[in-house]
Structures are given as structure tokens and as C-alpha cells.
Image: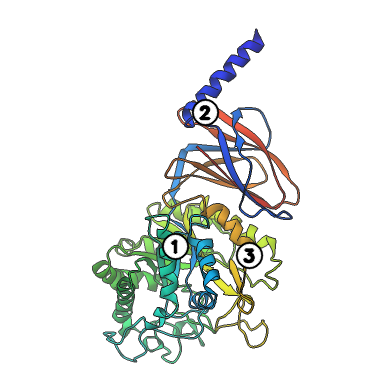
């Protein structure tokens, strides 16, 4: 009799689960794993069953929700655009599909330098006429050669499968040198204090932002948001930069830039900071605590170069929950053997994205979309490459221009395990993790649960994945799976 009761109970539970899952317990999943050929490879479907006991467990609860995701992307730098232009047409199409197509990573965001940066072939600005306060000589002609065509083709690729826009965040490294204290350099060759914007050009620099947005709009490219300054505390000696403290950036935002963009481009979002996570709370407190500045800021942009600092993100959200946190740049040292890349770089990227997302970050934008085989070109160093080529950064896709071969790097696949399945409008949902693995989960706009699980260890791990169904009194369905060593997997289910 007891056995019959258990059978009947399980039948009722299966029917109950089907009611809440649209009639299916099927789980589709994809995996990227070291020492296998699997790269974002679809796996044989799994199925939920009634709950069971198992020590290592990840529990997904879609009823508890957090931040809404705005997207993932990479940067249309001058260098990336040049390398793209040097590829034969079939490889150009391949790059576009790898990033922006439905079959690829489904990138929905991008970053765009306002003027030259370290990953440019040369130093340039949009107005080189000294003292041109009204910017009558302003032109983005430089960008029409390679950058704008690259962006337009990315937008066209997305339009083949979605009506959603490509949301572009634009960031300046430096104004034209004539606007700065040291009028002879876009770099910061002496001290941070001498790498500031001259007071007499505060209005001109705000106008420069506005004219840039307008010029791109005339090219049918919408700028979604801007950051006030890339890495305001860096003061680089050998590439473009400008120095702001949190106090001076706050004052410039509320007195000059904020009012100008509110008048000319009210739909364009402004993000403060745009530097390493270790000072996120400090900058947020100084700027967001001033209502006259905070009213112009949509959120705060962060980079990863000083480490995880996930606590800084969480604290910032607790203090200012109405302000978004967006990761706007990440890269690693150049890959010296693109044919056999370092697997740990992929794990580094996924670790950062998972940690960021679990601490309120709403999106992640990588650095250069494509570079050459040597992580070049740029004009800033370090000079550690062959011949006179200057380089020093990795890219998700490296291109051997001489032989016309593309080399996707490990972090292309690792980021794709997240970006491909977490579209804009997805909401992070609760995950309880009692395993040694890293995980995060989302509910997509079409109500699919997406769970990402990564194993950075040298051994496989058996785990149980459980799903708490809404309005069920915390009833669970579950399945057991082996997570391979050095692998990342994405599970999708209704």
C-alpha cells in the first residue's frame, strides 16, 4: 500500500510540475569544456524529475528577482575597426555573425571611444583648430572611414533577426589637446593636476559631446549613453587621458555637462566614473549624494583591472538602488600563442561576469572586438611584440591578417555561454548554491529560466540542480548532472 501511495504521489507531482512548466520538464543545455572539442556546443536534452536528496545542490527560485539586464557587447575602437577593414569580405561577415547574429553571441551593446584612445592607430580629435570655442570645425570625418561602416554593418546584422537596437555607450579618453592645461598633449606626460580641462573650455567640451551625438545621429547611429571620462584617475603617460576627481566630475556634471545634454539629447544616459571597481562606493557617494548632480546620472560605469571588488558593487546598490551599475571595459594581456590560448582567461571573464551580475551589474562590455594576431595595432605600447608593432591586449577574436585566419579565444566562448542566452530585459533570479561551483541565473522576457554553472577546478563535480516552481509552496523538481573540470554550461528551461 505504501508503494502504491508513493506512486500516486509521484504521478500527481509530475502533473503538478507540468502545469507550471508549460507541459514540459525538458532542459536544453550548452557546454564549453577544456580538453574537449565542445565550444558552446548543444548537448542532449535533460529532464527534470521529482525531487530527491543530494548534498551538492544549486537551487533556482524564479519568484525572487533582482536587476534587469541591459545587455552584453564589445568596443568599436579605431584599432578594431582597422583590423576588420583588412579582413577579406567572407571573414568580415564571419566576425559580424560571431558577435551580432542570432547564431552568434547576440551582442546588444557596444562601446565607442569619442576620439582617439590607446587602441587607435594615431592620435586624433574631431576639432583640431585651437581656440575654436563654438566648434565650427567639428567633424567626425575620421570615423567615416572604418569605425562608422563597421558599426553600420553590426546594426544591419542585428536587424536580420531582431528589432531591438544596438545600444552604444560612448566614452572620451581626452579632449583636443588645446582644451587642456598642457595644450601640447592629449596624454598626461607630467602630473594629473596638469592633465585637466581648462575652465575656459568647460562649455566647449560639453558642446563637443553634444555635437558628437548629433553627428552620429546623422549617420543613423544612435548613442544610447555616454560616460563622462574613461578612467578619470589613470593619468596615462603614453596615451590619451584626462584627470577628474569625484568632486570635479560631480561639479562638471551638475553645472555644465548634465544641463547641456538634458537640453540637446535628453534621452542619452550619462554614467559617472568609468574606472576600476575598488573605488565604486567612493565615487558613487560623492556624486550621487548631491541631488543636483545625481539627477543627471543614470548610473555608474566600472572596469575590472584592480580585481573583483564585488562588495563595492553590492554596497553601491544598497546605497543607491535607483542607479544602475554597468561594466564597460575588461581585457587581459595579449595572447602570445593565439592558436593555443590560455584557458584560464575564459574562466577569468566568466568569473567576473557571474560575480558582477550577482552583485547588481546590469551589463558587461568587453574591450576591442577584434585585433590582429599580435594584439595590435595601437599607438601606445607596451612594445613587447615583433618588430616595431606596439601591442599588449588580447581580443575575443584575433586575426592573422597575412594569412586571413580568425582565431576565437577562449573567453569568446565563455562570454557567449552567458550573452547568447540572456537577452536585454532578462531579470536576475535567486540562486542558492551549496556546491564549489560558480553560478548565476536569469528569467528571460519569454519566461525561460537560464542557469549558468562554471567549474574552474581540476576535477569533475556531481551536482543536483533544483528548480522551485512559483506558487507551489516551495515544491521542487530536480536533475543530477556531472559538471566537467574547467567547463561552463548554460541550462535553459521553461
Residue with the mark numbered 3: 409
**42 and 312: which one is in front?**
42
- Residue 106 lies, in percent from the top left, at 49, 57
Quarter of the N terminus within the rendering: top right
Does dot 1 land on a helix, a strand or a loop? helix
Does dot 3 land on a helix, a strand or a loop? loop
Which residue sits furthest left?
Answer: 263
CA–CA distance between discs 1 and 2?
Answer: 43 Å
CA–CA distance between discs 2 and 3?
Answer: 41 Å
**404 and 177: which one is in front?**
404
Tell me which residue sits at (32%, 80%) in the image: 202
Residue with the mark numbered 1: 157
Tell me which residue sits at (68%, 32%) in the image: 54
Tell me which residue sits at (69%, 64%) in the image: 342
Vertical position of residue 164 compared to residue 227: above or below = above
Disc nearer the start of the sequence (1/2): 1
Circles 1, 2 touching at the beta carbon (< 8 Å):
no
Residue with the mark numbered 2: 474
Which residue sits furthest front?
Answer: 90
Amino acid at each position: 500500500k505504501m508503494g502504491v501511495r508513493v506512486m500516486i504521489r509521484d504521478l500527481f507531482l509530475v502533473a503538478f510540475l507540468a502545469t507550471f512548466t508549460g507541459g514540459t520538464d525538458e532542459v536544453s543545455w550548452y557546454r564549453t569544456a577544456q580538453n574537449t572539442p565542445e565550444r558552446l556546443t548543444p548537448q542532449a536534452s535533460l529532464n527534470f524529475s521529482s525531487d530527491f536528496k543530494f548534498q551538492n545542490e544549486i537551487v533556482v527560485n524564479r519568484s525572487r528577482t533582482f536587476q534587469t539586464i541591459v545587455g552584453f557587447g564589445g568596443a568599436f575602437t579605431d584599432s578594431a575597426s582597422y583590423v576588420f577593414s583588412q579582413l577579406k569580405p567572407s571573414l568580415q561577415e564571419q566576425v559580424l555573425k560571431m558577435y551580432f547574429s542570432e547564431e552568434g553571441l547576440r551582442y546588444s551593446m557596444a562601446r565607442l571611444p569619442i576620439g582617439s584612445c590607446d587602441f587607435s592607430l594615431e592620435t586624433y580629435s574631431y576639432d583640431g583648430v585651437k581656440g575654436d570655442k563654438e566648434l565650427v570645425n567639428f567633424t567626425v570625418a575620421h570615423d567615416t572611414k572604418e569605425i562608422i561602416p563597421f558599426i553600420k554593418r553590426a546594426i544591419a546584422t542585428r536587424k536580420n533577426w531582431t528589432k531591438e537596437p544596438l545600444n552604444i555607450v560612448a566614452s572620451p579618453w581626452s579632449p583636443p589637446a588645446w582644451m587642456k592645461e598642457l595644450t601640447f598633449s592629449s596624454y598626461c606626460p607630467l602630473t594629473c593636476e596638469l592633465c585637466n580641462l581648462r575652465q575656459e573650455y568647460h562649455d566647449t567640451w560639453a558642446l563637443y559631446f553634444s555635437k558628437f551625438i548629433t553627428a552620429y545621429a546623422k549617420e543613423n547611429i544612435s548613442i544610447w549613453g555616454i560616460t563622462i571620462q574613461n578612467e578619470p584617475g589613470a593619468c596615462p603617460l603614453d596615451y590619451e587621458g584626462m584627470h577628474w576627481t569625484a568632486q570635479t566630475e560631480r561639479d562638471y556634471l551638475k553645472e555644465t555637462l548634465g544641463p547641456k545634454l538634458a537640453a540637446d539629447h535628453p534621452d542619452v544616459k550619462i554614467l559617472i566614473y568609468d574606472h576600476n571597481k575598488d573605488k565604486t562606493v567612493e565615487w558613487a557617494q560623492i556624486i550621487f549624494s548631491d541631488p543636483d548632480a545625481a539627477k543627471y546620472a543614470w548610473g555608474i560605469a566600472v572596469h575590472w583591472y584592480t580585481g573583483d571588488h564585488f562588495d563595492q558593487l553590492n554596497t553601491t546598490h544598497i546605497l543607491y538602488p535607483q542607479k544602475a551599475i554597468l561594466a564597460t571595459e575588461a581585457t587581459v594581456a595579449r595572447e602570445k600563442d593565439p592558436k593555443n590560448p590560455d584557458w584560464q582567461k575564459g574562466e577569468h571573464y566568466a568569473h567576473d561576469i557571474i560575480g558582477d551580475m550577482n552583485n547588481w551589474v546590469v551589463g558587461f562590455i568587453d574591450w576591442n572586438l577584434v585585433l590582429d594576431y599580435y594584439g595590435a595595432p595601437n599607438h601606445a605600447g607596451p612594445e613587447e611584440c615583433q618588430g616595431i608593432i606596439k601591442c599588449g591586449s588580447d581580443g575575443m577574436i584575433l586575426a592573422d591578417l597575412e594569412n586571413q585566419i580568425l582565431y576565437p579565444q577562449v573567453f569568446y566562448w565563455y562570454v557567449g555561454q552567458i550573452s547568447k542566452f540572456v537577452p536585454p530585459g532578462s531579470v536576475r533570479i535567486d540562486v542558492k548554491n551549496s556546491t564549489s561551483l560558480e553560478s548565476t541565473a536569469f528569467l528571460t522576457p519569454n519566461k525561460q529560466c537560464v542557469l549558468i554553472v562554471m567549474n574552474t577546478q581540476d576535477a569533475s563535480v556531481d551536482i543536483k540542480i533544483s528548480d522551485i516552481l512559483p506558487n507551489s509552496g516551495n515544491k521542487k523538481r530536480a536533475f543530477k548532472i556531472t559538471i566537467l573540470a574547467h567547463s561552463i554550461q548554460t541550462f535553459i528551461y521553461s
